Image (tube, rainbow, N blue to C red):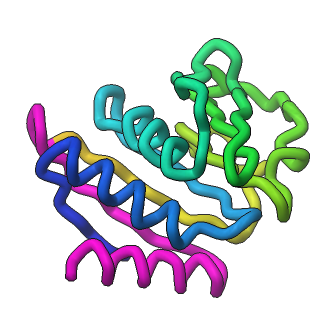
Amino acid sequence: MYTLELNSLTDTERFAKILSEQIEAGTVILLSGDLGSGKTTFTQYFGKFLGVKRHMTSPTFNIIKSYKGIYTIHHMDCYRLEDSDEDLGFDEYFNDLDIAIVEWPQFIEEYLPEDFISIELLYIDESKRELKMKAQGNNNLEIVGAVYDQFTS
């Protein structure tokens, strides 16, 4: 597991840019953190660097929103799926061509792929976050290591 300190929105933007430069088609990002920890802000920056022109918002009521950029990005907010066993066809979104960002992944664990990048954002104070990043799958492990090295150099 890699831990980074984000001391400003500029750091969050820089992290998103570095990750967007390393990301590969088919990557699934599990994004966790309390309300207000910066999940949507990270996603907006990440999407911007991958060519998304539309404003990305949290898909709380839609559950899944898709955006076109360099890749199709499927942004999922699974918060409302707590205590639900409904399969919304997640396997269609976890594919070799697109990027999937899953907020509140713990509520759909049984549908998640084996390989993923996990990012946890912890609220420290108004401008400071702690980011914990880990991965499963060889490509994802390489991506996470490269992102950490670039961010900390």
Percent x, y for residue 132? 33, 62
Q: Which residues are magenta?
A: 124-153
Percent x, y for residue 19? 46, 64
18 vs 33: above or below: below
Find out whether residue 140 is within the magenta segment.
Answer: yes
Quarter of the picture containing the N terminus is bottom left
Question: 14 or 41: nearer the eye?
Answer: 14
142 vs 119: above or below: below
Percent x, y for residue 75? 64, 37
125 vs 142: above or below: above
**Residue sitting at 58 percent across and 51 percent down?**
50
- Count numbered badges in the picture: 0
Question: 86 or 91: nearer the eye?
Answer: 91
Question: 75 or 22: nearer the eye?
Answer: 22
> Which residue extends farthest top?
61
User: Quadrant of residue 97 in the image?
Assistant: bottom right
Quarter of the picture containing the C terminus is bottom left
Q: Along the horizontal axis of the image, is 42 left or right of 28?
A: left
Find out whether residue 28 is within the magenta segment.
Answer: no
**Residue sitting at 59 percent across and 32 percent down?**
53
**Residue sitting at 55 percent across and 65 percent down?**
117
**Residue sitting at 70 percent across and 17 percent down?**
62
Percent x, y for residue 63? 68, 24
